[in-house]
Image (cartoon, helix red, strand yellow):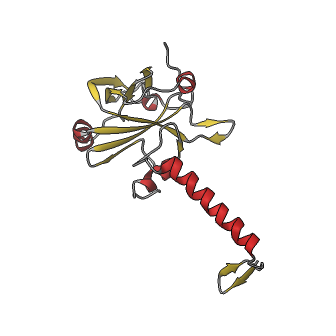
């Protein structure tokens, strides 16, 4: 391999055997891509995604990934970790969990802005990305796309922060899902049957 003016080139003889190998490799890659992604408008069910990958797929800034909820038009993107670390502040220990294999309970952030609350209420679709825990064995885990649903059954929650004494207001929602979780995810995500 040689570098010429910032470009790398292979220094190999382009014979029929090499050309056939490269054509097979490209055909294999295209076939794999088509079988995995051809019918997917947005996200593939049960596949792993990092927050930045989701933002890129939506043509948004991949560095805009510090929150757990994003609103884009009539859609919401929700990232939720089910088991919170013991060191997580009480106000951040949300009541996110699967009630059944096709019903997710989600709690919005504390003291949500009026604009974001209105966006929640106007959402037609919510895309859920769930992970069991943030980290496992020192490795940051990706989220699993578990599908699309809709916000329903809004319930206002008022809590007093034990450290500050301030009132924290959140809203709890049920999200009926289009697809039921497969059994292996039901186990991982603690779905009680």
Judged left or right of residue 118, residue 7 is: right
Percent coordinates x, y for residue 126 in the rendering: 34, 38
Q: Quadrant of residue 12?
A: bottom right
Residue at 42%, 41% (x, y): give it: 68
Quarter of the image where the N terminus is located: bottom right
| Residue drawn at point x = 54 percent, y = 53 percent | 33
Provide residue 185's location: percent of width, then percent of height. Answer: 54, 27
Q: Which residue does the image show at 33% across and 42% down from the upper left?
A: 76
Residue shown at the point (47%, 38%) measured from the top left: 45
Image location (x, y in percent) of residue 151: 29, 31
Q: In which quarter of the image is residue 102?
A: top left
Residue 37 relative to residue 109: left or right: right
State whether residue 64 appears in this view: no
Along the line of sight, the residue nearer the viewer: 130 or 24: 24
Residue closest to the eye, 83 or 143: 143
- Furthest residue in direction top, as rendered: 193
Taking the image as shown, residue 121 lies to the left or right of residue 3, namely left
Number of marks in picture: 0
Is residue 188 visible to the viewer in this orientation of the structure?
yes
Task: In this rendered view, identify the residue nearer to me: 118 or 55.
Answer: 55
* Residue 143 x/y as whole percent: 52, 39
Residue lying furthest front: 16
């Amino acid at each position: 391999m040689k570098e010429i003016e910032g470009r790398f080139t292979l220094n190999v003889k382009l014979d029929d055997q090499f050309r056939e190998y490269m054509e097979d490799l490209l055909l294999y890659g295209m076939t794999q891509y088509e079988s995995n992604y051809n019918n997917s408008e947005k996200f593939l069910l049960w596949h792993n995604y990092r927050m930045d990958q989701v933002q890129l797929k939506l043509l948004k800034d991949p560095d805009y990934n510090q929150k757990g909820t994003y609103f884009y038009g009539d859609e919401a993107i929700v990232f939720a970790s089910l088991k919170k670390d013991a060191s997580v502040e009480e106000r951040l220990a949300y009541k996110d969990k699967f009630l059944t294999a096709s019903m997710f309970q989600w709690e919005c952030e504390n003291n949500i802005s009026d604009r974001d609350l209105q966006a929640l209420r106007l959402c037609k679709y919510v895309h859920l990305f769930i992970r069991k825990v943030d980290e496992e064995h020192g490795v940051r885990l990706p989220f699993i796309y578990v599908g699309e649903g809709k916000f329903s059954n809004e319930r206002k929650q008022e809590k007093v922060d034990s450290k500050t004494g301030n009132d924290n207001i959140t809203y709890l929602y049920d999200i009926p899902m289009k697809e039921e979780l497969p059994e292996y995810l039901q186990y991982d995500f603690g779905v009680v049957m």
